[in-house]
Amino acid sequence: MLSRVADSLYWMSRYLERAEHSARLIDTHLNLMLDMSADSSDQRWKRVLACLPLQSQNAPPIDTQGVIEELTFSTRNRSSIVSCISAARENARQVREQISSEMWMQLNRLFHEVKRARSEGPGAVQSLDFLSSVKDGSMLFQGVTDGTMNHGEGWQFIRLGRCMERAMSITTLLDVHFREFWRTADASDEAADPLEWVGLLKCCTAFEGYCKVYTAKLSPARIAEFLLLDGEFPHSVRFCVERLDSALNVIDDATHRR
């Protein structure tokens, strides 16, 4: 496989995973705002910005609308939702012959949905339907990819990009959250700020998965263990790293080079 083709497949996958992660963070924090004061809301959005690879030249004002605009529709920010989906589509366009027609149609559909929402203005994001469409569209693309593309070298590069972006996103999220909320006394006790820890789990689609393993008692140490070391949960760091290793080994075997 040509290196430019592998590069496009890898980044197409990473950008889509990043867009889905951003949409989930915004969605989760908009819902948590309903139970928070204005002061804690400002701090929450600062935390969201710290969790995402913000790449605009000027930091957005710390207000709900300004942050949402920056993370969704800002073209200055190369990691905004619209920028990520546009970049994913452009990478896919360059390798049309390597992906299935169903993959291209799904990604193109998602691109036009986001473009239409952008033309409607910032108020479109306040409707959680937009954020749901981004999350659902990205997950649907993953399913279409797994169901319609040969699971050869190209598919492995797509899996590589998804797992790399996911592992980095989860570790950054954990780092930011624990830096602010970790208390040594809470290491084996129930979390002192349960709503914040529920929010962390929901940002990783992990609340139900965590409860199935540890019950609904929220312990920071157990949350860290689950999100870092669980071998069965798709958004744990261990799960992602093991899939990274598997993909690299398959690519190694196919190319006879490390």
Image (cartoon, rainbow, N blue to C red):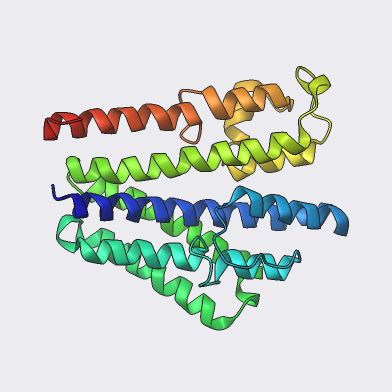
Say whether residue 168 is left or right of residue 44.
left
- Number of disc labels: 0
Q: Is residue 4 above or below residue 241?
A: below
| Quadrant of the rendering where the C terminus is positioned | top left
Q: Is residue 119 above or below residue 216?
A: below
Whether residue 37 is visible to the viewer of this picture, yes or no, is no
Residue at left 73%, top 24%?
Answer: 219
Q: Nearer the viewer, residue 143 or 61?
A: 61
Q: Is residue 143 above or below residue 216?
A: below
Say whether residue 193 is left or right of residue 221.
right
Say whether residue 130 is left or right of residue 219.
left
Residue at left 73%, top 28%?
Answer: 218
Residue at left 45%, top 72%?
Answer: 113
Q: Nearer the viewer, residue 107 or 73?
A: 73
Say whether residue 194 is left or right of residue 225.
right
Indicate the position of residue 139 as horizontal and vertical percent values.
42, 51
Quarter occupied by residue 221: top right
The residue sitting at the top extreme is 188
The residue sitting at the front extreme is 57
Residue at left 20%, top 57%?
Answer: 100
Indicate the position of residue 52 as horizontal and vertical percent values.
58, 52
Whether residue 239 is visible to the viewer of this picture, yes or no, is yes
Indicate the position of residue 107 as horizontal and vertical percent values.
34, 63
Indicate the position of residue 135 as horizontal and vertical percent values.
49, 56
Q: Nearer the viewer, residue 144 or 219?
A: 219
